[in-house]
Image (spheres, rainbow, N blue to C red):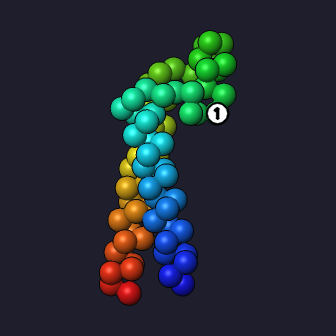
Amino acid sequence: MIILKIFLIIVGLVSTIFGYLIYFKKKYDLINGFEEAYKAGRKTKSYAKRVGLVELIVGIILTIFGISTIIIK
C-alpha cells in the first residue's frame, strides 16, 4: 500500500511541475498538439493557461493527499 501512496505523490509532483511550466513559464509546447492547433486558430493562449492551471491545482491536490495519507495512515 505504501507503494501506491508513493506513486500518488510522484504523479502529483510531476503534474505540479508540468502545470507550473505551462502556467507560469509559458511552455505551451508541453501540451500535445497545441502549436499546430494554435497556428490553425483552433486553440488560444487562454486555453493553454487554463490547462496549465488545472494541471497545477490537480498536482498540488494529489501531492497533499498522498503526503497526508502517509502521515495519517
x, y percent for residue 15: 48, 50
**Along the horizontal axis of the image, is 57 left or right of 38?**
left
Of residue 38 and residue 16, the one placed in the foreground of this image is: 16
| Image point (35%, 65%), residue name | 64
Please name the residue shown 39% across and 80% down the image: 70
Quadrant of the image containing the N terminus: bottom right
Residue 55 appears left or right of 38:
left
Number of numbered discs on residues = 1
- Residue 54's place in the image compared with 26, above or below, is below
Q: Quadrant of residue 42?
A: top right
Residue 36's place in the image compared with 12, above or below, is above
Q: Amino acid at mark 1?
A: Asn
Q: Is residue 54 visible?
A: no
Residue hosting label 1: 32
Residue visible at 50% across and 82% down?
2
Nearest to the observer: residue 53 or residue 15: 15
Point 33% across, 84% down: residue: 72
| Rendering quarter of residue 60 | bottom left
